[in-house]
Image (cartoon, rainbow, N blue to C red):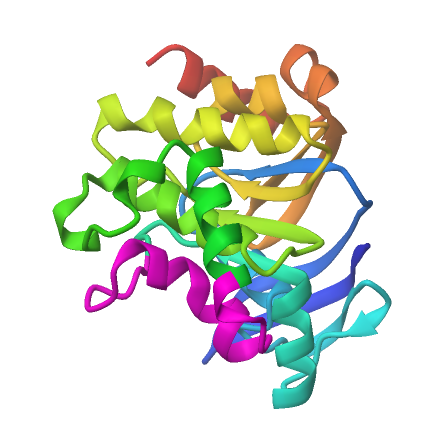
Amino acid sequence: MIALESVNKWFGDHQVLRDCTLTISNGEVVVICGPSGSGKSTLIKCINGLEPVQSGSIRVDGEPVIQSSAVLLRLRRKVSMVFQSFELYPHMKVIDNVTLAPVVALRHDKIEAVQKAKALLAKVGMAAYAERWPGSLSGGQQQRVAIARALATEPLAVLFDEPTSALDPEMINEVLDVIILLAQSNMTLVIVTHEMGFARRVADRIVFMENGAIVEDTPTAQFFANPRTERAARFLERIFTH
């Protein structure tokens, strides 16, 4: 469903992705983790075409990801992204944030889009907030609206870029619980996160990155019980002893 082959990317003279090869199948939940600056967020932004790559290839549902407006439009119908900073439009009510892409980009009927948006807001526990402005919501509430918006285009996969990193601790679980429900519904999810307890619970596989490279791609149980690399073992030790 998602296939990366020998992907390399630079920002100027700094190489941020190094020969990354990764395949994600339909219905898989893959968590990408690693130390800060290891390339995790850049990797998923490249999958969604938000960042171009300098070499290698990325395919989503069989189609190459290239910097073409027509290709990127098709891509973003198939792959939605949830950002750490919510990225809701502050001048639009919650319901309008959720219906924007289906109505404007996909040309769906407005009445049908509103009905679907209300159902999605109910799914993430935000049905009562449809007519509210994003600025009146807590961070956790805004992120749940952002998840509903990501689902509104009926994507094949959803990418999460550290979805809880901007939240206060008491708001983290309300967002993680929504993601767990999505995982249980056999959606394809790719999640960048430092919440390793959550990763252990939800992921089929763990991809561990360091210095822009994928150094471990392991079934979840094996990663936590017996990581293949010393670097991953140190990473887990530091997280679970703090």
Residue 52 position in % (x across, y down): 59, 78
Is 164 above or below relative to 49?
A: above
Q: Residue at x 50, y 47 (%)?
A: 160
Front residue of 57/106: it is 106
**Nearer the observer, 92 or 42:** 92
Estimate the x, y position of residue 205 in percent, counting from the top left.
71, 31
Residue at image coords 73%, 34%: 186
Is 226 left, or right, of 147 in this rendering? right
Is residue 94 in view? yes
Q: Position of residue 103 (x, y in %)?
A: 50, 73
Q: What are the residue bounds of the magenta stretch?
A: 87-111
Quadrant (top left, top right, bottom left, bottom right) of the C terminus: top left
- Considering every residue shown, the one lying at the far left of the view is 136
Task: Establish if 69 lies above or below 31.
Answer: below
Q: Quadrant of residue 12?
A: bottom left
The residue at the point 59 percent across, 62 percent down is: 17
Residue 118, image x, y percentages:
44, 47
Q: Nearer the viewer, residue 177 or 23?
A: 177
Tell me if residue 188 is in the magenta stretch. Answer: no
**Residue under the image location 49 percent in, 34 percent down:** 123
> In the rendered view, does 151 fall on the left or right side of 29?
left
The part of the image, by quadrant, that contains residue 241 is: top left
